[in-house]
Image (cartoon, rainbow, N blue to C red):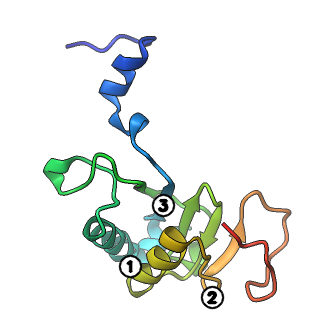
Amino acid sequence: MAIPDFIENFEELCDLAPVATAPIRHHVFVCTGKSCSARDSAEVRDAFERELTTRGILFGKAAKGKNPKGSVILTECASVGFCAIGAAVMIYPDGVWYAQVRSSDVPEIIEEHLMNGRVVKRLALMKVPAEGEVHQSESTAEWET
Ligand code: FES
């Protein structure tokens, strides 16, 4: 069936993109650009997928072991400029950018940030929107999600 250039019917849109009706709370991006890949970002991404799936909160098709009503979207992205300090992980809507993330850090990020709303300060480097200043992660209360 050919999909028209522009779909106006809301129900049809939701049928074609079930994520539109999922209770999404967080969008996690893992950079898989060249430099982050050299820092094993694929393992970071796999760890997110494994841990989120185990917790039953990863949005996706049930046939793939995911939850159609999951609250977390996980996607790969291209370089965001943390190339020398990867792997980069960004979590929205909080706008927190993590640097130097390893697969061993993933359970902590999920438990602290996604489940309990507490930023993992030792890995957090910036928050969007940003004023163009580097935050000292130990000294600011602005990290609240
Ligand atoms: S390759 Fe990941 S931030 Fe540049």
Q: Amino acid at mark 1?
A: Asp
Compared with 136, 29 (above or below) is above
Distance of label 3 from label 2 (alpha carbons): 18 Å
Q: Report the amino acid beneath label 3.
A: Val
Q: Amino acid at mark 2?
A: Arg
Residue toward you, 81 or 109: 109
Q: CA distance from mark 2 to mark 1?
A: 19 Å
In which quarter of the view is residue 74 placed? bottom left
Q: Which residue is mark 1?
A: 40
Spot occupied by residue 49 in the image (x, y as percentages of width and height): 31, 66
Q: Residue at x 71, y 66 (%)?
A: 127
Q: Is residue 10 above or below residue 113?
A: above
Q: Are marks 3 and 2 in contact (CB under 8 Å)?
A: no
- Residue at figure coordinates x 50%, y 53% from the top left: 25
Q: Which residue is mark 2?
A: 122
Front residue of 87 and 24: 24
Dot 3 or dot 1, earlier in sequence: 3
Q: Which residue is mark 3?
A: 28
- Indicate which disc, 2 or 1, sits on the residue closer to the N terminus: 1
Residue at disc 3, secondary structure = strand
Q: What SS does tag 1 mark?
A: loop
Q: Is residue 39 visible?
A: no
Which label lies toward us, 2 or 1?
A: 2
